[in-house]
Amino acid sequence: MNSQPEPLSTRRDFFARTSDGIMGAALTHLLCQDFFGGSEALANEASHAPQQYDLKPKQPHHPPQATSVIHLFMNGGPSQMDLFDPKPVLNKMDGKPFPGNIEDLGNSNTTSIGEMLGGQYKFARHGESGMWMADVLPETAKMADELCLINSMWTDHPNHDNALYKIHSGRLFMGYPTLGSWTVYGLGTENQNLPAYVVLTDPLGAPKNGTRNWTSGFLPPTYQGTRLRPTGSPILNLKPQYDQPSAVTESARKLLNQLDSIHREKRPHNPLLDARIESYSLAARMQMSATEALDLSSETQHTLTDYGIGEKETDSYGKRCLLARRLVER
C-alpha cells in the first residue's frame, strides 16, 4: 500500500489555520474594552462598568487634512455617465438592441430592456487635470482643478434602495453605520452644544429608505444623525416656554443630571437609555447655541445672493448649504 507523504505547510497554510484564533483573541479584547473598560478593569471586579459612549472630541490617528465634512447627497440626480463619465462605445450603440444577456443584470423583474441609449450631452476636458465634464455644467467646469472626482466606484446591485445603503454606509444592505456615524464615533465633536452629525433633508420629503440613511447601525444610538426640519424652524420647541433667571435654569439642569445619573445606575448596559438622556441634555444646551447658528438673518445680502437664497429654483437648497456651513464653522 503506497502512502504519500503529507506536503509541508506553507506560510499561507499557517496563517489560514491560525487566523480564527487570532481573530477570536482580538474580538475578546475589544469586547472587554467595550463592556468592562479594558484589561485593568478585569483585574478588579469592583470596577466592572460599561464603557460610556459620548461625543467628546478624540484625537485622530494621523494629523487631519480636513476639520469637518459636508456631504451633499442629491437623491435621484442625473447619471454620472451623462455628466462626468463619457462612454464612446455606448454612444455608438445608441438606438440598437441590448447586446448582452438580460439575466446577467441580476434583476429577476426585468424581461425586456429595450434599446441602448447613448450620452445626451457633449463632453470636453477641463482644467489642467483634463477632467471630463458635460457641457451642461459650465460653472462647475471652471472649478475642475479644485475637485476630486472618483471614477472607480461601482456596485453590482441594480436596486435604488440598496444603492443608497451602499453610498451612505459602504454596504449593500441595511443595519450598518453610515459615514457620518463612523466619523462621529471615531472623532467626536469640538462643540458639545450642537449635534455632531446633522441631516438637512429636502422639503419635498426624505430620500428613499428614510432615517436608515443616517442610522448608527450597530454602533450606540448616540452616534446617529440628527435631522433638522427643512422648512420653518429647524428644531421645534428650541426656545424655553418662559424666561427665568439663569441661576434657576442651571440649578434645574443640575438636579435633572443627578436624577438621570441615579436612573442610569439602576439600568446599566442600556445604550438606548444613554442616548435618550444625552439627547435631552444636548437639547437643553442647544437653546442658546443652535438658535444663533440656525439664524440666517445675520448674513449679508451678498452671501445670501451667492447661495441663491431668494431665487425660486435655488432658495431651499441654498439655505441648507448655508446652514451646513454655519454649523461646521461653529
Image: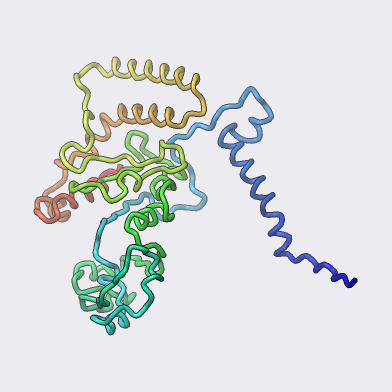
Outermost bottom residue: 92
Query: Which residue lies at the image location 9% right of the left edge and 50% below the top edge?
Result: 310
Query: Which residue lies at the image location 44% right of the left edge and 19% below the top edge?
Result: 263
- Locate residue 121, reporting x and y percent: 20, 76
- Locate residue 10, reporting x and y percent: 75, 66
Query: Which residue lies at the image location 31% right of the left edge and 69% below the top edge?
Result: 111
> Residue 114 sits in which quadrant?
bottom left
- Locate residue 117, reporting x and y percent: 25, 76
282, above or below 125, in the image: above
Outermost right residue: 1
> Residue 76 sits in which quadrant?
bottom left
- Locate residue 6, reporting x and y percent: 82, 67
Q: Is residue 11 left or right of residue 61?
A: right
283, above or below 231, in the image: above
Of 291 and 33, the residue lying toward us: 33
Of 65 and 16, the residue lying toward us: 16
Q: Is residue 80 left or right of residue 233?
A: right
